[in-house]
Structure formats: C-alpha cells, structure tokens
Image: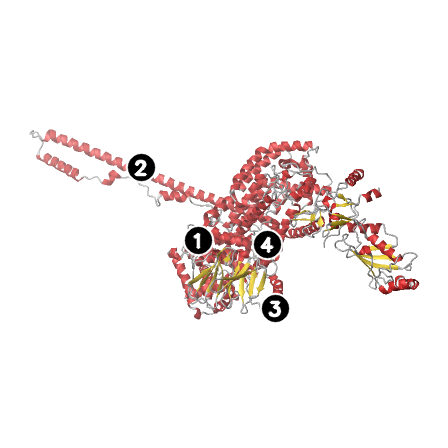
Amino acid sequence: MEQFEQLLTCAICLDRYRNPKLLPCQHSFCMEPCLEGLVDYVRRQVKCPECRAEHRIPYQGVQGFPTNVTLQRFLELHIEITGELPDPTSGQVMERCNVCSEKAYCSFCYHCDKKICDECKGAHMEILRREISRINNQIRRGIHRLQDSLNLVEKNVQNVQTNCLSVGEEVEEIYRRLNKALKDRTDYLRNEIDRYLGTEMRTLTGLKENLEQEISNILSNCDLADKHMNENVDIWDDCELMDAKEIFLKTIEFIRNFEYENTDYTRKIRLILAHDPNQLVLHVAGFGDLNMANSSSPFSQGTSTALLQPPNPGLMRSKSDHRLAFRNQDQSYGERGYGDQDQDNVLSGRKFGERSQKPQTDRYGSSYGRTGGEYGDDYDHDRSARSKYSSRFRRRNNMADDDSDTESRGVRFHDQQQPHKTERERPLDTEDVTRGPLSGITRLADSPRVMKKLQENPTGKKKEKETPQPPAPKQPQVVPKRPPPPATRQVSEDDEIARIKKQNKGATTSTETATETRPAERTATTEERHPPQRKTPAPEAPSSTEESEGTVAALHQRKPAPPATRRPSSDAGHKKSTRSASSDSSSSAESTSSGAVRTTGAPFTTEEVKQKYLSRSEAPTETRGRTASTGAKDQQPKSTFQSRFLSKAAPQPPAKEGNEDDDDESETSTEEETESEEESDEPTSKRTDEKMAKSDIGPLLARSANAREPGSSRKEESPLNRLKYTAPDDSANRYGGRRRTTATDDEPPRYGYTSRFLNKSKSSAAIAQDEDDYSPRLSATSTLNDDDSKYPSNRSRYMALKERRQRLARSRSSQQFGDEDDGDDGGVTTPISPTTSNPTAYLASRGYGTSASAHDLARSRSSHALKSRDNSPERPAASGEKDGAALSSWARYLKNKYGNRSGAKDKESGSGAGGTSSSSSATRRLSLGLPLRSSTDLASSDDDQKNMQGSPTTPIAATVAAGIAAAAAGSRGSEAGCFTWPRGVAVGPDNSIVVADSSNHRVQVFDSRGRFLKEFGQYGSGEGEFDCLAGVAVNRIGQYIIADRYNHRIQVFDPSGRFLRSFGSQGTVDGRFNYPWGIATDALGFIYVCDKENHRIQQKIAFSKLCKIARNQRVLNLTKNGNISMRSLLHPANSNII
Amino acid sequence: MAALPRRIIKETQRLMQEPVPGISAVPDDSNARYFHVIVTGPEDSPFEGGLFKLELFLPEDYPMSAPKVRFITKIYHPNIDRLGRICLDILKDKWSPALQIRTVLLSIQALLSAPNPDDPLANDVAELWKVNESEAIRNAKEWTRKYAMDN
C-alpha cells in the first residue's frame, strides 16, 4: 500500500498527483505547480526531473502534455479504497497569491479582498481573530457605558413618568380651578339675575298697578264731569265746582307732568364681560400647552423635570479607533460575517458567516451546502447596505452632536446593549437571530451558523465574535442544520436551536429567562412602573434635574425606545421600525402595521412553527421559561402587546424629530449638514466602531468631564455650552424669536459665523479629539465665561458672545436663563430656543456639568440652541425695540472693544476669579461704558493671527486680527466679498487678508481695509480647483498656500492667484494627507500642514531644490518626531505651530 | 515570507520519521528552510568514523532550484574546498526537482567515498590525490581524525 501511495505521489511536490501530466519520457508530474516550475521558458522545453530527458513543450504549454489517465484512475481507485476525501483543490486552477505571490490554490480572502493562498489566508484569519479579541476586550471595557445608560434610561423613564404625572396633575388642577371659577361665577351671575328680575318685577308691577289706578280715577272723573258738570242743573255749588276744577287742574297737571322715566321702561340687565368672550374662550381653550419636543411645557407649567442624561450621547470615538473598527468591520464582513438579512445590519444582508456571492466563493458555498441563489444579496448589496448603515450612523452621530433631538437617538443608541439580550425574531428572516434593536448587531450565539460551528467544534473557540459575548459554551446537542425560518423563532423553545440559544445566553451575561421575560416584564410593568418610579428621584438627577424640556422630549422619545428594542421577537417590520425610529417617521406606520401583522399572523406562524418542530422530533417543551413563545395563545397576547408598544413607541421619536428638523431647521439644515459631513468622516457608522471608540475615549471623556467640573479651572466646555446657549437665547430673544423664514443666507455674517462656530465648538466638545481644530474656539468661548486669562488668544473673536453672557450674568444670578432672558429682554419669549437651550445653559452655569451626563445633555441641548440660533433672524435691523436695546449694548460693546483698544485695561487678566467675577467685572465696565477690551485681548491678537490660518474664523475675527477697525466684512453668500463657511484666513505680506472661502471653493483676498480685491479657485479637483479648502497661508513672497482639504493636497498659487503647483494626495504615509486642514508657513518657507485625519503635523519643504535633500532629511525626521509628539494632540488641525 | 511549501514540510517530516542511516538533518528552530546536517563518513573511505557537519539551505524556489549545501567541518577532499563548498553536479546544473534533501545528502555521502579529482574544487588536494593518492588519503584520514572526530 505504501508503494501504491508512492506511485501516486508526484516526485516534485511529494504530494498526491493533481492533474498528472505524462511526459514523453513516461514520467508523470502534476501539471502545476510542479511541471510549470520545470519549464525552461527560454528554450521552451522541460527537463524531466527523473530522467533529465528534455522535451519540447507543446504549443499550449505544459497543459498540452497528455494527462496520465491511468494514473488518475489509480488516484480515484486509491480514494475509493482508502476513503480519503477528495482533494479539495481538485479541479481548481492555481493562481498567484496576491499576498505572497506564491502560486497556489487561491481563494478569496475577505480580509483583504484579494484572492490569496491558504497560508496567507490563515494568517489573515489569525489577524482577524486577534483583532476581534482585541475589539472584544474593548467592548467589554466599554459595555458598562451601555449599562450606565440603561440605568440612566431607566431612571429617566421614572423621571418622565414622574414628570408626566405631575404635569398631568397640574393640568387637572388647572382644569379644576378653571372649572370651579367658571362655575362659581356662573352661579353668582345667575343668582344676581334672578334677584334683579325679582326686584324689577316687583317695582314694575307696583307701577303698573298705580298707573292703572290713576287711569281709572281720572277716567271716572272725566266721565263724571262730562255727565254732570256741563248740565245746567245747578246741583253743584261753587265750592264744589272749585274743588272739582282744582282736581281737574291737578289731574291735567299730573298728566302733563307725568313723565315716566325712560329707564323704567327700558330697564334691562346686561352681562358685562371683563374680557372678550372669544378671547376668554381662546385663553381657556389654550390655557396650557405641552411642548414635548422642546419641553417648554414643564417650564411654562412651572413643573420641573428631573431627568437624567446618559453619560455621553453617541459613544464618542476617535479617529484612529474608527479606522481600526472600520477595518475590522470590513474584515468581519469578509471573514465570515455574522450577518443576516437586515440591511442595516453589520453584515448587511448576509447571514453570519455567509460569504457574499462571488464567483470565487462558489466552492465554499457548495461545500457549505448553500446555493448561491439563496443568498441573493451580493456584494454590491453589501456595499450599499453598508454605506447606508454608515450614513445613517453618521447622521445619527452628527445629529447627536448638533441636535438635541438626536439626543434621544444617542440615548437609544446607548441603550443598544441591552437589546442584545432581547431576542428578536423575525418571521420573515431566514436567519433569525437576536439582534440589537439599536445597533442591529446580532447575537452571535443565536446565529444558526455559529451554533452549528460551536457544536461541530465544541472545544474550538468561537473565533468570530463580534459582539461582546463570551465564548459560547460548547453545545452538546446537535443543531439541526439551518435554523427554521423566521416565525419559527417565536415559538422556538421547542427547538434545539432555541435551547442552544438559551444556553448560549445563559453563558452570556444575561440569562435566557431574563432576556425572554424582559419584554413581558416590560409590557406588564410599563403601566405599573409609573407609580414607583415616580417617587424615586434619580440619584444622579440633581445635576440634570432642572434641565429640561429638551430632555423631556428626549425622554419621550427615549421611553418608547426601550420597549421597542426589547421586543423579544422580530420580524422585518419590527426591524425596520426600530431602525427607522431613529431616522424617519415613516417607521411609525410601518411598525404599527407590522405589529398588526404580527398579531394576526402570530397564530399561524406559531402553528407552522410547531409543526416544523414537531417534525423535528423535538418535543415542544414549554417549560423553557420563554414567556411568549410557546403557544399560539401566548404568542398572540405578546404580539398584540408588542404591536401596541410599537405603535406607541416608534412613531414618536421620528415624528418629533422629523418635524423639528424639517420645520424648524430647514434652512440651517443645509449648513449643519455640510458641517456634519465634514465631521462625519470620523463618525463612521459601525457600532463596533462606536464601541471601540467609546472604550478608547474613556480617558478623554473623563477629561472632558473634568473640564466641566464646576470648581476646576478647566471649564472649557461647560462654559462653552453655556455660552452657546446663552448666545442663542439672546439673539433669539433679541430678535423676538426665531424666524424660520429667514434664510440663513440673509444672516449677517457675524451671526452666521458665530453660529457656525458654535456648531463646531459644540461638536468639538462632543468629539474633542476629532475636532481639535476647533478647540481654540472652544477655549476661546470658555475664556469668555470663566477663564479669560487662560485663553486670551481667541477672546476678541468671541467678545460678542461674552457680551451676551455678561448681559445675562448681569440680569440674574442663578435663575434660569430662559427666565432671565425673558426678564432681560422684556419678556420676549421665543417659543423654542429659550426653553430648549436654557436648561443646559442653566445647567452649565450652575456648574452642573460635572458629570458626563451633564456634558452630554449640554451637548445635545446645545445643538438645539444652535439650531434655534441659526434660525433666529439675527439681523439687527429686524430687531424690535427691546432688541434694539440689546443691540445698542452690543454695538456699544463692539465699539468699546474695537474702537478703544488703546484704552484697554487689563481687568480680566487675573481671571482666576472665575467666570462670574470676570463677567461681572465686564458687566460693570460695560455698564460704566468703559472699554471692555483688555490688554490681554490685545496681547492675544497675535495668537489670533496665528490661529487664524487654517482655522475657520469669522470675518470679524479676521479683520480684527488684522488690526482693522471695521467690525465685519462679508456676509454669507457666494458673491465676491461673501463667504460660505470660511475656514481659513491669513494675512499676506502686504497686509492683505486671504480668506479660504471653504464652501465656495475659492480663495478671496481683501485689502487691509477689508475691501475685496480678488478671488480665485473654483470647485473641482484639477489644478487651481478646490474642494472645500480649509487652511490658507501666505508665505513671505506672497504665494498662497492652500490646504485643499477634500482633495487631500496642498496647492500653491502665486501672488496673482495663478496655480503654481500642488503636492500631496490622500494617504497616511509621509507626504500624503488625509484631509489636511490647518496650514502655516514659516520664514524659511517651510510649510506645516495639519494632516487632520492622520493626527499629525507634516512639514513640507519650500520648493527650492537646492536644499531639497537636506531638508528632505529634515522633513523626515521632523515628521517622525512630529508624529510622535503630535500623537498626543488628538486632532492638531488647528494648531499650526509645531 | 510565505508559508512553508508542502513539499518542504513533507520532506522534513519524512527525514524525521525515516532518517537515512548515517545522515541526520534537522531543521533550524528559527528557519525551517535551514537544516543542520551531520553526515557520517562512509565506510571504506578515508572519512570513515568522522562526523561531518554540513549546513543545508532550501532556497526560495526549492524544489525548482537546488538546495545550498556546505560543509562546516573541515574536510580533505578534492571536491570540497576550504570553505566547505561542494562540487557536485546535482547541486548545480544537474539538479532536478525530483531530488530531495535525502538524496542530496546521500549523494554527498557517496561523494565522500568516491572522490573525483578530475573535477576538482580544491586544486591542491586534487593534485595530491592524483599524484600521490595514498598520501592524500592519509591526509584525509588525518583531517578526519583531527576535525571530524573530536566531538
């Protein structure tokens, strides 16, 4: 037998013959790689390794040698005898491995998207495993955040319930009061009327009787006189006649004089209303309003909501994490993802471990007993799905940053870990796995594939863990191959898979029963929960208790979310609903409908399932503790409940958000979106990313949280937030509320930019490391509030903000900003902005920003404020008289600041006193009409200039930095002299001001007086074209150096604006850029580029070839050093100085 | 570096499992393509009793190209120079992929028992071998005793 084997072994590869080719010398060798390797291509011959006979190679190559059919038969025979598995590579063609370039039987590697050989593939898989475990560790480390948010959410649920109850009670109270008042008054009025009627009737009747008496008397007298007085019969003596005459005279006199008072005839009663009844009705009809979205109602109603904020909204992530995570994601896609059909799932339409259908993978498909058709989602689908997911994610992130509405989203997202424990079953899905409703992350242990794997390989570790699950215990049972389709899941206790799942779950942190019962609990307790929770004020609440209506809204949205996410079973509709809950309102309808479908369909499905399982010979055991899923009956209630829940839950958030966004933010949305796009590079969309980022960002978070510590000197962000909020409030108040119709284009540049700035700084607060480019601004704002000396540099820019702040501070100490604003501005309340933003502002001002949650809140709230601010017509001209007052102070302030520089006093230099003191002093000065500009400000202008390059500064700042008295230059727009998102400014040697008009894709040059000189550049990627240029610098000889951000290059223009050269392209190696932003040049002509997404500063040499080599050397070194040193700077985009 | 080709693995396994008498080849711990080889001097040859150390390296394109083999132990042999390089046709142009490590080593062992002074590498040795074979053989024995039998 051994010899037999030997005969079947190729002498070259010492392996079993594969496609043996017979040489003319009767020796046989595998066609490839053996025979291929023997070919002498020069002489077109092959030398037999055995006998050294040389044979000419046929025209078609070694393929042309005849196949040794006999040997093949023997091979087959051998296989039959020994029962060996056929060579898996038989019938395959060797290719060059794309990694090691070895010729081998290659298969597609999802890790690198290449066809590679098994060895490389194994290595890649190892890499993947390691990465997964690493990520898993991070997830483990980060999961507590989700737990925290879960706790917070639960607390918030209580709070919301409490809040709602109290509000409801209040409404009830008001109703009672109004009712009582109305009733009392009505009764009183009725009584009065009755009384009046009685007296009037009495008097009138008396009068009537008297009159009748008179009339009868007089008539009888008249008759008597007619009859008897005219007769000549002298029956009357004179005396009698005299009396009669007197009587008659008196009568006539009486009749003449009798004048019935008019009032006696016209007496009537009238209901005099103090108010116009219509108005009264209106007042009553609208005696209160509940503003959930902006949560203004609690304030208007005088109720306070104690809401908790989750520690941080969308888990923050750093760029690098992203990259890793993203890559990982890709890898996981490739490797064998855990997907299922949902598009927004990580695996986007693939089952876990399903290979996307590529021709190369056919082999695997067949070996796994799958047909390609079954998994129609091909790679493209994956792509799109992935991108979709990411975009959604991005959006969410952005929103979370920009928009307090999305805070709820963030929260929901936070929540997503628990959903993990829930079991979602989708009847429509072929692969029914538990899936995180928020993240769409599936529970791996539920994946039939994983189960199968685990069973097949009990000891083998679960290598492809994506979710934070401990490796599932080994499964003794044999899993019945593919899990039942959709609905089966619902009844699936009986199922082995279910059992396995259960076990898996048991192995994981959450026990199966817990997960299963949770939904039920939830449903049952949702109503019940209210009372107990109402009473329990969240322990952490104090920080955020007063905050807000915004949070109320968030809560509203949030509350529904958990139930929705909890749903133990899932179908496509459900999935959609949860997904869409975060994005669009259409989901509501969908979810409800799905719920309905569910209810109706449940019995059937269960039935079906049962049958299936019965046929599977597993006795249905109902003791599994799955509340919902055993029987049709159980199913029914559950599903109904769910549907109810869904309809309740899902619709809310989307509707709200959609409305808000669409209605209120329509104009700003564009702006914000552009902004968010810029920032969306980093918020990639995968949940894993998020998680990772989260875990990695821990320290950062902590830092930021510290920064918000009230007592600490680093009040960078909280003040910022505060500022942010106050500013919008102010403006909004000043201008009498937000005017939605105002086009942002019309906004005076000052405001536009400010708002933009706010926007950015807010986001930077959120993702500090990502947005370091804005950090100066951040600090600047903080300066305004608390620590003037600390960040004096940017101060001048934000004087306006400061001023507002001062004004605020002046008017009130600890009151809510909203109230304060109202009082300050004469009670002009803006419907949304004050309320929404105030809580945070308040919070911030109160120093409640200690906790991350507060920060979180602040951030989300800030986005609100921002929005409102953006929308608010910030047009001095349009302001009312109150506004005028505010404006005047503003103007005065500006004047003081810019006009009286020389008289500046350094009052704020000793700003250790903190925000209040500095602001109060400023206020004092302001009130005294003293110049506010302090020497620190003056000193800081240098810094301003430095920072200006590459940083999106407002025109004001630019001009100020240039030493121009002009308050502002430009406005929003695309004409000459107008800007759209200017991101960089520089001052040329001739004192010209060069502005990188980013979203207009051009550079504008102004003279030192702010007059427009020229512009150059347009959108594109060609020479002299820009794509959202960011930084701009002017070197000694007047050349413009532009960081062409989205083209990942630096362009150089001559002083007249002609394109000279460009360098750089996207990449991470030295000399390549990833969204270069800030740019600076030094006296030697070196160019320093903030390679933003690469987190480094690169130094580029000037273009003198003489010193090229030497400087190149230096560049290298410096870049290296820079890399090292700049790593600590998370996002050095705005720091142009190395 | 790419993973080890199957052939090398197989050869190594076989060398370990069925070692050739008088020859031991052990792959290096850090480099599976590098073998530490010990060849015993063949009987009835001046090298009898000696243990000759060699190093063998399988180049990247092995088995399409010959392994690189070199004596580490000094040996007095007309076809092996002072540096231990071996003049053996199958290590050069006569290499065939059908040859293996074991066959190469066997060939080397055979070369020890059948020196070929007509195709010399060490000219002085070859010269002596041709002129005065007995002295050459004595020298070879001396060297063997001196260098190959100490340990």
Is label 1 in contact with label 3 (beta carbons under 8 Å)?
no
**Amino acid carrying mark 1 in the image:** Thr
Residue underneath mark 2:
A198
Mark 4 vs mark 3, CA separation in Å: 39 Å
Q: Badge 4, how many Cα within 10 Å: few under 14, some, many 20+?
A: many
**Amino acid carrying mark 4 in the image:** Arg
* Pointer 4 and pointer 3 on the same chain: yes
**Amino acid carrying mark 3 in the image:** Ala
Is label 2 in contact with label 4 (beta carbons under 8 Å)?
no
Query: Along the polypeptide, which appears first: circle 1 or circle 2?
Result: 2
Eye-nearest disc, 1 or 4: 1
**Circle 3 chain:** A
Residue A54 in sight here: yes
Helix, strand or loop under label 3: helix
Question: Which of the two residues, A556 or A583, is positioned nearer the viewer here?
Answer: A583
Q: Where residue A907 appears, x then y in whole percent?
A: 48, 68
Q: Badge 2, how many Cα within 10 Å: few under 14, some, many 20+?
A: few
Residue underneath mark 4:
A317
Residue underneath mark 1:
A744
Question: Which of the two residues, A664 or A735, is positioned nearer the viewer here?
Answer: A664
Query: Along the polypeptide, which appears first: circle 4 or circle 3?
Result: 4
In the displayed structure, B7 sits above or below A1112; it is: above
**Circle 2 chain:** A
Query: Along the polypeptide, which appears first: circle 3 or circle 2?
Result: 2
Query: Along the polypeptide, which appears first: circle 1 or circle 4?
Result: 4
**Amino acid carrying mark 2 in the image:** Gly
Helix, strand or loop under label 4: loop
Residue underneath mark 3:
A1110
Please give left or right for residue A745 compared with residue A776 in the image. left
